[in-house]
């Protein structure tokens, strides 16, 4: 376990602002309730719905999930190729909470933090505060799946022991305490998959934390000064993963910028510019400006634009309702008097709009252009559903009188239409094939 020395500077100040914003956003978002009563963000697994910024999504909308995952992946590719491992150093929870744990340790133990001769009493306080922070973070993580207001009420009433979320909270609390408190940088160096393929996403033009080896090398050896690097090793001392940035791009570098602030402060005493900063490798080798537009970034940008455009089109054109229709296998279609066919169909209807809506069911014979009588047990086949509400019903379909030729066609293609009773343009159609009984 590596306990790095704290370091102040411009990069540290900017990271403090970004990290405070991200942690605040993480803690506040699950508590936000929109005017219609729906949460701002929640993945409600028991109800199988996902609330996102006023929208309601369901597992059947797999294409939207595919667009979302593809957007996240391509964004990672694009931004890594342009500005390096900015996610690791500025937005990754592993980095943010490791930094927070270190702040707690230094606040309690001061200069004894991370040393073997620290008092047991002080260590106990540090571990206790780490557990508290882990519990708070885990509570809010679970709050993205379960209402935080309900969980808080259960905790206050001491009736949480029989709730599943309580055991998930305990698990994540223990996992975070062990990971951030003791595994720390080892996760970044040996377990994080992103660290493994970062070199495939970056090239010599990527803007990243880099050591200016042309100015710095060869380093000072004793009193013999050759390059600008004075071999103070402060860049190693402040590194949270314990690497030496002067050895070049490495898996362990999370681009946090602590070495930039350290080198800046040391070189300022020498009246020289920092040897470590946000540069590109090509910029250091040739002195040329960073080449932002290049084949790699253009391809990623085009793909990302296409995917985002597709996602927007899918969101704009989506119908805020869902219907699954299936013929009743145990009750096949039958022939009734007047050469009519009666079929039995099971429907599962869900309102995925953020407000209550009234729906109406109709059915049609798509081959002959005739309307099919539908009996749902509801008056005029109209019913209301609240946001996210599901209605499972069995309906009876009854065709108009069919000719002998139509009865001998073997099957009857039809469709069931679910539409908004107040807006006929908002509709969803499901195709259905009715097997005609043999005569």
Image: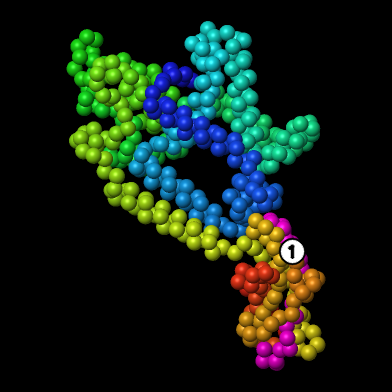
Question: Left of 2 or right of it: where is 53?
Answer: right
Q: Looking at the picture, how far across and down is residue 117, in whole percent?
A: 53, 7
| Residue drawn 70% across the image and 67% down it | 359
Q: Nearer the viewer, residue 178 or 29?
A: 29
| Depicted 203 relative to depicted 180: above or below | below
Mark 1 burial class by Cα count in 10 Å: few <14, some 14-19, many 20+? some
Q: Looking at the picture, how far across and down is residue 143, in whole percent?
A: 65, 39
Q: Give the range drawn in magenta.
A: 385-406
Query: Quadrant location of residue 379?
Result: bottom right
Element type where label 1 sits in the image: strand
Query: Quadrant location of residue 426?
Result: bottom right
| Residue drawn 64% across the image and 72% down it | 424
Q: Looking at the picture, how far across and down is residue 378, in whole percent?
A: 79, 70
Q: Quadrant of the C terminus?
A: bottom right
| Residue drawn 62% across the image and 54% down it | 56
| Depicted 142 relative to depicted 101: above or below | below
Q: Looking at the picture, how far across and down is residue 63, in whole percent?
A: 53, 58
* Residue 423: in magenta span: no
| Residue drawn 67% across the image and 85% down it | 370
Q: How many marks?
A: 1
Q: How is the rendered protein coloured? A: rainbow
| Depicted 311 relative to depicted 75: above or below | below
Question: Left of 415 or right of it: where is 95?
Answer: left
Query: Quadrant location of residue 290?
Result: top left
Residue 290 appears in the rendering: yes
Residue wearing tag 1: 384
Residue 326 appears in the rendering: no
Q: Nearer the viewer, residue 341 or 282?
A: 282
């Amino acid at each position: 376990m590596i306990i790095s020395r704290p370091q102040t500077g411009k990069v540290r100040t900017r990271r403090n602002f970004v990290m405070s914003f991200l942690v605040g956003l993480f803690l506040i978002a699950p508590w936000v309730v929109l005017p219609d009563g729906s949460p701002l963000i929640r993945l409600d697994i028991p109800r199988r719905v996902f609330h996102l910024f006023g929208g309601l999504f369901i597992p059947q909308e797999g294409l939207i999930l595919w667009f979302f995952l593809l957007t996240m992946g391509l964004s990672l590719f694009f931004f890594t190729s342009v500005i390096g491992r900015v996610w690791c150093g500025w937005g990754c929870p592993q980095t943010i909470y490791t930094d927070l744990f270190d702040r707690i340790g230094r606040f309690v133990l001061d200069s004894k933090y991370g040393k073997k001769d620290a008092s047991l009493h002080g260590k106990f306080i540090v571990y206790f505060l780490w557990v508290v922070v882990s519990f708070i973070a885990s509570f809010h993580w679970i709050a993205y799946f379960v209402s935080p207001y309900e969980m808080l009420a259960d905790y206050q009433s001491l009736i949480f022991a029989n709730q599943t979320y309580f055991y998930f909270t305990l698990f994540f609390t223990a996992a975070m305490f062990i990971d951030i408190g003791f595994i720390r940088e080892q996760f970044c160096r040996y377990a994080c998959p992103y660290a493994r393929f970062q070199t495939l996403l970056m090239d010599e033009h990527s803007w990243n934390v880099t050591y200016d080896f042309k100015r710095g090398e060869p380093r000072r050896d004793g009193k013999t000064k050759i390059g600008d690097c004075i071999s103070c090793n402060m860049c190693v001392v402040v590194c949270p993963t314990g690497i030496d940035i002067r050895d070049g791009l490495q898996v362990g570098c999370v681009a946090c910028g602590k070495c930039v602030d350290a080198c800046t402060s040391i070189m300022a005493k020498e009246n020289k510019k920092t040897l470590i900063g946000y540069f590109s490798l090509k910029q250091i080798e040739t002195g040329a400006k960073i080449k932002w537009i290049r084949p790699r970034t253009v391809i990623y940008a085009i793909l990302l634009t296409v995917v985002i455009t597709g996602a927007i089109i899918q969101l704009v054109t989506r119908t805020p309702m869902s219907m699954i229709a299936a013929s009743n296998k145990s009750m096949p279609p039958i022939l009734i008097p007047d050469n009519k066919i009666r079929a039995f169909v099971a429907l599962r209807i869900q309102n995925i709009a953020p407000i209550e809506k009234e729906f109406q069911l109709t059915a049609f014979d798509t081959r002959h252009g005739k309307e099919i009588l539908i009996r749902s047990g509801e008056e005029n086949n109209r019913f209301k559903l609240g946001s996210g509400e599901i209605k499972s019903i069995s309906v009876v379909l009854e065709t108009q009188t069919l000719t002998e030729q139509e009865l001998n066609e073997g099957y009857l293609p039809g469709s069931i239409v679910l539409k908004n009773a107040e807006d006929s343009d908002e509709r969803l159609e499901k195709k259905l094939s009715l097997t005609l009984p043999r005569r």
